[in-house]
Amino acid sequence: PGVPRFAIDRGGTFTDVFARCPGGRVRVLKLLSEDPAYRDAPTEGIRRVLQEELGVPLPRDQPLDASGIRWIRMGTTVATNALLQRRGERAALAVTRGFRHLLHIGTQARPQLFDLEVAMPEVLYEEVIEVDERLIPEQPDCHLPGVAGVTLLVQRPLDVARLREDLERVLARGIRSLAVLLLHSYAWPGHEQQVGALAQSLGFAQVSLSSAVAGMARAVPRGLTACADAYLSPGVRRYLRGFCQGFRHGLRGVQVLFMRSDGGLTPMDTFGGARAILSGPAAGVVGYARTTFDPQDGTPVIGFDMGGTSTDVSRYAGEFEHVFEATTAGVAIQSPQLHISTVAAGGGSRLFFRSGLYVVGPESAGAHPGPACYRKGGPLTVTDANLVLGRLLPEFFPRIFGPGEDQPLCRDTAAAALSVEEVALGFIRVANEAMCRPIRALTEARGHEAARHVLACFGGAGGQHACAIARTLGMARVFIHRHSGLLSALGLALADAVQEEQEPCALPYGPGAFPRLEERLRELERRCRDGLRAQGFEPEQIRTEPFLHLRYEGTDCALMVSARGHPAHPGSCAAGDFLAAFTARSVPQCHQLCPSVTALSQCHCPVTRCYFEGGYRDTPVFLLGELGSDHVLPGPAIVIDTNSTIVVEPGCVATVTRFGDINIAVGAGPAAARDTRLEPVRLSVFSHRFMSIAEQMGRALQRSAVSTNIKERLDFSCALFGPDGGLVSNAPHIPVHLGAMQEAVQFQIRNLGPELREGDVILSNHPRAGGSHLPDLTVITPVFWPGQPRPVFFVASRGHHADVGGCSPGSMPPHSQSLAQEGATFVSFKLVTNGEFQEQAVTEALLAPGAVPGCSGTRNLRDNLADLRAQVAANQKGIGLVRELIEQHGLEVVQAYMGHVQANAELAVRDTLRAVAARWGTSLAAEDTMDDGTPIRLVPPPSPQGSAVFDFGGTGPEVLGNCNTPRAITLSALIYCLRCLVGHDIPLNQGCLAPVQVRIPPGSILDPSPEAAVVGGNVLTSQRVVDVVLRAFGACAASQGCMNNVTFGSARGGYYETVAGGAGAGPGWAGRSGVHTHMTNTRITDPEILELRYPVVLRRFELRAGSGGAGRHRGGDGVIRELQFREPTQLSVLSERRATRPYGMAGGLPGAPGLNLLLRRDGRLINLGGKSSVSVEPGDIFRLLTPGGGGFGPPEDGGDPQGPPEPPDPQDLWRGSAFEFRQAQEAL
């Protein structure tokens, strides 16, 4: 073609330009995204290319003539950076009355389990308008046309007059951007459209309707997406206007397309807001997918993009993998986007040595001061370690470092701090293992074998780690494109323009719905084709692909499913067999030939000294631009490109392809050492591997479970145990499960002993067998190894089942007085024998409580059986991973490092106890009481030697009710508290309790008799134990101290939720409002899903203003939650802190106690007390007021200062990480 075409990726630091010029010439360049010398980096890049092509100077101060440009394609991080740095437009939120704090509360889960401060990103709006209107789901007598499968009733019409006053008030404050979230607007957007029209008529410049931005059910993510759109779109538009002003006639007549988060290109006038957040990373995925994946052999590809502060990983196997919802910078975005997992680990990740453990990140040195070698006084980083090892060559870097930005990288600074190469290599190995974890999550946790992938490496820092990471994962090949340093720009050149249309639908998938589905899919296809034809595409250039957002009935986790590969048949929808595709899941190359150059033996090859396993090796250095086709580079070797350094490790062989790319065959490398002696680097690596096993078990369980509790509320935990039943690693899902499963496994070892055989799986939930409460069913599987007569490891998974029988629906009776009233019990039940699932026997056991007077068997047998099978499958996943680890390192080594990892946790806790003893002395004690007056007393005198005796002597006796707590729960609370006090990541295992001797009086509320009722001990008393421990150590004020358990239902089934409250304030922070604290972290059902699935209306869900205790730092506020019932049902409430108040600390005042009220439809107002079960009728309203957190410091000190916003936490960079199970599941 005779006209230039530009593909430009504008990143946060650099802008990459890929230009295809007349005659097929390709020009590439990289320039700073921000530079005083020019106004806009992409415009400057185009100017430089045109200037070189035309051979005439083009002044920067004059607009460019774009008449000769065919097209411009861009990806940009403008929206991402604005979100991370919280530098978007001032915005307001208009939301249905009663829900002003809905987006602040969100899912009510906290991102970091052991962060007492509960640091979370703030909302994107600064003003809230409550809109008087309400739609509710209704089947009969529908007043409104809803989407397919959903009908609605106008419970309260829109009050336009009051809305006008509120909008004018917000405008007077200078706010011109508005997000609108009205409940159930996805099904009928009429009210939102009226709000939007009024706002625009009054002068709002940006109005983002949730129904238009993300028209799908689930109010919280839809509202967050609308807020992100309102917050980001004005800034994106300003940038686009500024970009156009750099050209004559504003780029009229030039096709300008921008990359969206879903990997498709869209015209400039439709680009912006929420769909721009992953614009840059999405282009990189398209780049490696188009250049690495070979459709002939179909080998899937893992994309590995390692930058300075973070690393993106993704997968491509012939089609792009999308998710419909993911979280970026703490904001859930509900729109189609490529599945990209980002971890806060990169070249700038800081290095630490803590309690004998090598630690890499997540803290980053940033660009300023940067790594130590930048000569600006920065900390040690991964980049420094690579420099010390000789893998980065200062002479090939620009001289832009030091105070004057005119010096080269400084190897001496890094080496002086690290002291020896072995330490540097150790940190590199730990960093590599950390970056392998998200790759394993994308592959092995989803049923794909990592070793059967190609690793496509790009980004500035990835080439230094690619061989080692591929070798660790068992991959045989690494592919590095010749333009790997600007692959995102190349991806833009290769991407397709995409027009996407969607609409909600709630029909059950089946033959009866096929005509309606086919009609709507044809209509959506017509809209897409019309949109693309309007952009200038011919009909023959357009290809459409339908997707359905499918979920199992009764669940809320859905998958975006394409029928590609599953053609239509007489029993399917005409667009394809989507059911088969759903079940199966629970492109031209763009190369330019590289001319051959001189043979390798004739190349100028400087040699450097580079440190690998075994010592220094002479390592030749090659310039990629001087290599020709078919050059073979045996490792070790270093290849220098303009924008990256590639390390070919010993045992690997790099080949330059005829296109100029690098293909690396990864050799086996040195055999893993079989030395059982403690070595700090291997300790860190094994710690990562053990934790990865537990994490992948958890993902497998969530993926295959069907119940709301496990799949959506994430009320489960998975763990790995040694041959003695001692905890090795526990993926921190639910804190109350942390140490309790260890007791359960050790009981089975004592109870069954030699009866445990390969092919057996044990089911247990009894408190005397290490259980917590009966709904928590624990599935335990022994791991055997050839030649070993006894199990070499154990794996276990514990999940909360919605019902296991008993005297009330949900198996959470508030007034139970014996264990028999709480449901089915299992002590050492063989769920699987010789590999056969014992369905009939477990069914009989689950129905057995029906023989107890006043009780019933399980009310949801189908979900019980399905979730138990899922737990068995998750355990099998863990067994496979354990065996893989043993095959790699040997049984003796793996078991030795199991012991070393446990000893390391012990060391970390001893360090903490020594520090406490030095600061507070050894005379610590604390006491708190339950609402019935039962005391819980603790004397934990830490010794200077790093040990402590946690003595609960003086704690009250077993109670007649159900707040008795099995011993295992008290141990879980202690592990949780010790981990919080340590303050940084440590392995969560039995070593945490090794320095601690625990004394619990037999027969007390913390060690009751075997048949005592315990359902409240797990969810209530466990919180009080945490309050007492943290009070003894002076860590922070009390949080709400309750889980606020609410259950309602009938013989047909029930619903269970726990509700957030206020967090306690601490020495340097105010308590977070409306969040789950301490021993639980379950999510709450979205308001729209709750109302669609259950016979209730959620009238209010907002913060309880003033309920947090006053202090220099205020305690967090509790919440107010009102449920109005629509049919007769049984309501049960199990709660604490209704008579006692969460204590303040250091002079801070206590938080407000909770309150449970029932408003009868006849007008009576009834206080239900803390524990109650009552029959409710249609129209009755349950009002829950949860406790606030205690304050810290005297209130007269002036309260919490309102300082500038904090910089983004490194954890905000994570996407698709282990604690975001919903986002991970969306892509399964």
Image (spheres, rainbow, N blue to C red):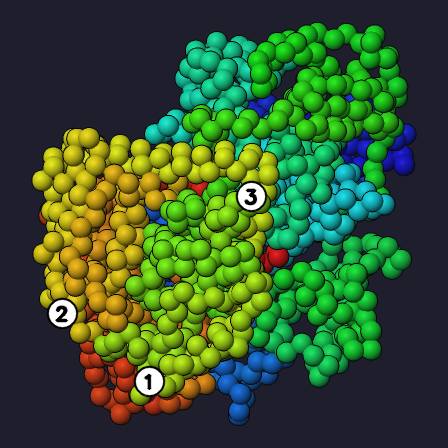
Amino acid type at image mark 1? Val
* Residue that label 3 marks: 787
Q: How many marks?
A: 3
Is any part of residue 13 visible from this angle? no
Q: CA distance from mark 2 to mark 3?
A: 56 Å
* Image coords of residue 912 (percent x, y): 25, 35
* Residue that label 1 marks: 852
- Determine whether the residue tagged by mark 1 lies in a helix, strand or loop: loop
- Determine whether the residue tagged by mark 3 lies in a helix, strand or loop: loop
Point out the frontmost of discs 1 and 2: 1
Image height of 838 relative to 141, above or below: above
Point out the frontmost of discs 2 and 3: 3
Question: Quadrant of the rendered structure where residue 1211 is?
Answer: top left
Could you tell me if the residues under marks 2 and 3 are in contact, i.e. CB atoms within 8 Å? no
* Residue that label 2 marks: 932
Amino acid type at image mark 2? Asp
Residue found 39% across the figure and 49% down from its top: 725
Image height of 635 relative to 74, above or below: above
Amino acid type at image mark 3? Gly
Question: Quadrant of the rendered structure where residue 813 is?
Answer: bottom left
Quarter of the image with the C terminus is bottom right
Is any part of residue 722 visible from this angle? yes
Residue found 45% across the figure and 31% down from its top: 683
Left or right: where does residue 739 sit relative to residue 78?
left
